[in-house]
Amino acid sequence: MKVKRVLISQPDPGTEKSPYQETAEKYGLKIDFRPFIKVEGVNSKEFRQQKVDILAHTAVIFTARTAIDHFFRICEELRITVPETMKYFCISESIALYLQKYIVYRKRKIFFGNGKFEDLMDSIVKHKDEKFLLPLSDVHKPEIPKALDKAKINYTKSILFKTVSSDLSDMKIDNYDLVIFYSPTGIASLSENFPNYVQGDKKIGAFGPATAKAVKDNSLRLDLEAPTPEAPSMAKALELFIKKNHKENK
């Protein structure tokens, strides 16, 4: 089957010069973007059930802008005034600068890494006497808590937001010859939104080993996978796949 319509289960990158657009123009594809998952904040009741006292902590670790948004949202909902003495440890400078949305940046003690958590750990270890709060999603990488445990850091995990399935009831999944997924939760959303989905000769792509495993665990056939040595990005993997597919279906 010649692939003509592709669905990418992520938000539209919003740029005409994306690698996906170049592939679409080169091979005459119709590529649509639609996120299969979305992030929702936990409500104040759910947060209270975790029995986390924000003001008992002297530092916060942020690995994403989303975590910053929901940390300050919860504080506002619970009328918690974050003291000026609170220290902030951010995985990158861009995330640290995002704090300006909520605090007077120059008046706070802020530390940041180069985008890798192991780099930020150097700063965290230098401040081992702090009591850290780690805001997370319900779906998160275990490597970060493991690194903190290994270094014997005094910290508390708190789930401030969660990943849930988007409502895709208005979409006709069978219109697409190829659907590309980027997370196991995207596969879960497919099952939730389309419980009677039959793959047949339709193609499925996955980015990352966890997503690939989720495809197979759901008794689906994996036709396209990235990253690989030849295709470090999904955009490149798609280009190579379409080139081969169109050649075979001339």
Image (spheres, rainbow, N blue to C red):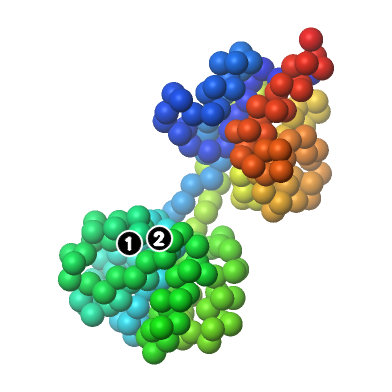
Residue at x 61%, y 40% (from the top left corner): 233
Residue at x 22%, y 72% (from the top left corner): 108
Whether residue 40 sits left or right of residue 146 in the image: it is left
Please say if 4 is above or below 73. above
Closer-to-camera residue (87/10): 87
Residue 88 point in image, percent of width and height: 33, 72
Asked if residue 49 can be seen in this view, the reply is no
User: What amino acid type should be assigned to the residue bearing mark 2?
Assistant: Ser
Q: Quadrant of the C terminus?
A: top right
Residue at x 78%, y 16% (from the top left corner): 247
> Quick one: SS at disc 2?
loop
According to the picture, the residue beneath numbered tag 1 turns out to be 96
Closer-to-camera residue (101/239): 239
Q: Residues within 10 Å of mark 2 (few under 14, many from 20)?
A: many
According to the picture, the residue beneath numbered tag 2 turns out to be 92
Residue 149 point in image, percent of width and height: 56, 82
Closer-to-camera residue (103/92): 92
User: What amino acid type should be assigned to the residue bearing mark 1?
Assistant: Ala
Whether residue 152 sits left or right of residue 70 in the image: it is right
Whether residue 111 sits left or right of residue 207 in the image: it is left
Residue 71 point in image, percent of width and height: 35, 65
Q: CA distance from mark 1 to mark 2?
A: 6 Å
Residue at x 56%, y 16% (from the top left corner): 25
Q: Quadrant of the N terminus?
A: top right
Closer-to-camera residue (230/176): 230
Please say if 245 is above or below 80. above
Asked if residue 88 can be seen in this view, the reply is yes
Please say if 145 is above or below 94. below
> Quick one: SS at disc 1?
helix
| Residues at discs 1 and 2 in contact (Cβ within 8 Å) | yes
Residue 36 point in image, percent of width and height: 56, 40
Q: Residues within 10 Å of mark 1 (few under 14, many from 20)?
A: many
